[in-house]
């Protein structure tokens, strides 16, 4: 469960995009993820952070990178939030965390250099 959470904070992917990733979407050599959209003009390639890369590397023996369904993940996330008394934290808030950290240059791959807003908008 923790790797699902860390992955979204490291990549900013929406839950559906994360759960629909296949191994064909991941280029380990280039350390990139290809994110397909319904409109091919907005499909994009995202760099993998070292943490996101290691999460995927540790899951290589699975049929797909993230195999839980939205329902099971939602149940587990809800239970975790209740256990930690974080009732108001949504999954989408994790994506916001990614964006906030990127704007402030707080991700390890940024080395203190904030991500330009236009680049962040394209990433998300």
Image (cartoon, rainbow, N blue to C red):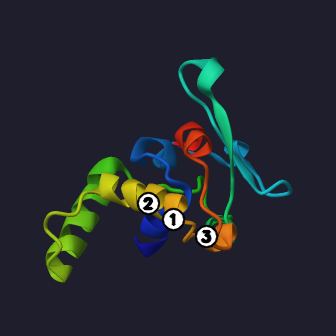
Local crowd at mark 3 within 10 Å, few (<14), some, or many (≥20)? some
Q: Secondary structure at mark 2?
A: helix
> 25 or 105: nearer the eye?
105
Whether residue 44 is visible: yes
* Left or right: 106 as drawn, with respect to 91: right
Q: Are marks 3 and 1 in contact (CB under 8 Å)?
A: no
Residue drawn at 61 percent across, 31 percent down:
36
Q: Are marks 1 and 2 in contact (CB under 8 Å)?
A: yes
Local crowd at mark 1 within 10 Å, few (<14), some, or many (≥20)? some
Q: Nearer the viewer, mark 3 or mark 1?
A: 1
Please give the residue where the numbered disc 2 appears in the rendered image. 100
Please give the residue where the numbered disc 3 appears in the rendered image. 55
The label shown at residue 104 is: 1
Q: Secondary structure at mark 1?
A: helix
**Residue 97 point in image, percent of width and height:** 40, 62
Image quarter hosting the N terminus: bottom left
* Residue at mark 1 to residue at mark 2: CA–CA distance: 6 Å
């Amino acid at each position: 469960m923790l790797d699902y959470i860390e992955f979204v904070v490291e990549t900013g992917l929406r839950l559906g995009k994360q759960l629909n990733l296949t191994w064909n979407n991941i280029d380990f050599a280039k350390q990139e993820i290809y994110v397909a959209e319904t409109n091919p003009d907005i499909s994009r390639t995202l760099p993998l952070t070292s943490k996101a890369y290691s999460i995927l590397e540790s899951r290589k023996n699975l049929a797909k990178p993230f195999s839980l369904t939205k329902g099971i993940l939602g149940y587990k996330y809800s239970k975790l939030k209740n256990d930690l008394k974080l009732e108001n934290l949504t999954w989408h808030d994790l994506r916001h965390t990614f964006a906030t950290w990127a704007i402030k240059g707080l991700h390890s791959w940024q080395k203190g250099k904030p991500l330009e807003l236009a680049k962040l908008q394209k990433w998300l």
